[in-house]
Amino acid sequence: MQNDPPIAETLPVNAGKAAVWTPGWANWFFSVLRGLTGWRASITVQATLDFPLISAQSQATLDTPMEGANPGDGIQVTTAQVAGVAFSAFVVSAGTVRVVAANYSAAGVNPPAQSFTLIGLLQ
């Protein structure tokens, strides 16, 4: 693994002093991250999921395809926030990710159908 940062290029920042990732810096950081964690690649999948009514203190699951994902790979879930509901995911079988919606509130919640971005970190 080549870990030399792209030092010919300074890491630019925006007006708020946050880093702006150029392709050179992004590739370097991902290379280091993959080397440290053992991830060999990543996959990003968009899925529109419509969970049913979830009772208080309960959870619901839906499966969606993610070609190339295998049990043990890490899955990151991003979507719009739903009050009282936490979303997570894991690979249930080769090529299939199970998204879990856990309702931590004291009342039932019916999350709206929405787009989920699932990022698979492949080992």
Image (cartoon, rainbow, N blue to C red):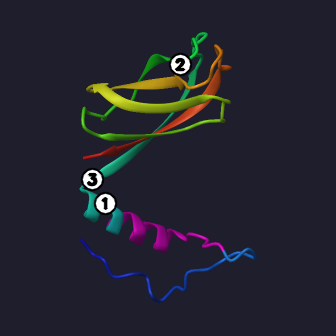
Element class at badge 2: loop
Element class at badge 3: loop
| Residue interval drawn in magenta | 18-31
Looking at the picture, how far across and down is residue 66, in whole percent?
38, 30
Q: Is residue 76 left or right of residue 36?
A: right
Label 1, label 2: how far apart the Cα atoms are? 36 Å
Label 3, label 2: how far apart the Cα atoms are? 37 Å
Give yes or no for contact between labels 1 and 3 (Cβ–Cβ under 8 Å): yes
What crowding class fits label 2: few (fewer than 14 Cα within 10 Å), some (14-19), or many (20 or more)? Answer: some
Q: Is residue 63 above or below residue 78?
A: above
- Seen at 66% across and 35% down, the residue is 80
- Seen at 65% across and 16% down, the residue is 107
Q: Is residue 97 left or right of residue 2?
A: right
Reading the image, the residue beneath label 1 is 34
What crowding class fits label 3: few (fewer than 14 Cα within 10 Å), some (14-19), or many (20 or more)? Answer: few
Reading the image, the residue beneath label 2 is 57
Disc tally is: 3
Element class at badge 1: helix
* Res 5 quadrant in image: bottom left
Query: Which label's residue is closer to the chain start, 1 or 3?
Result: 1
Q: Nearer the viewer, residue 22 or 123?
A: 123
Query: Which label's residue is closer to the chain start, 1 or 2?
Result: 1
Amino acid under disc 1: Arg
* Res 99 quadrant in image: top left
Label 1, label 3: how far apart the Cα atoms are? 6 Å
Q: Is residue 27 left or right of residue 13?
A: left
- Seen at 59% across and 10% down, the residue is 52
Reading the image, the residue beneath label 3 is 40
- Seen at 36% across and 31% down, the residue is 90
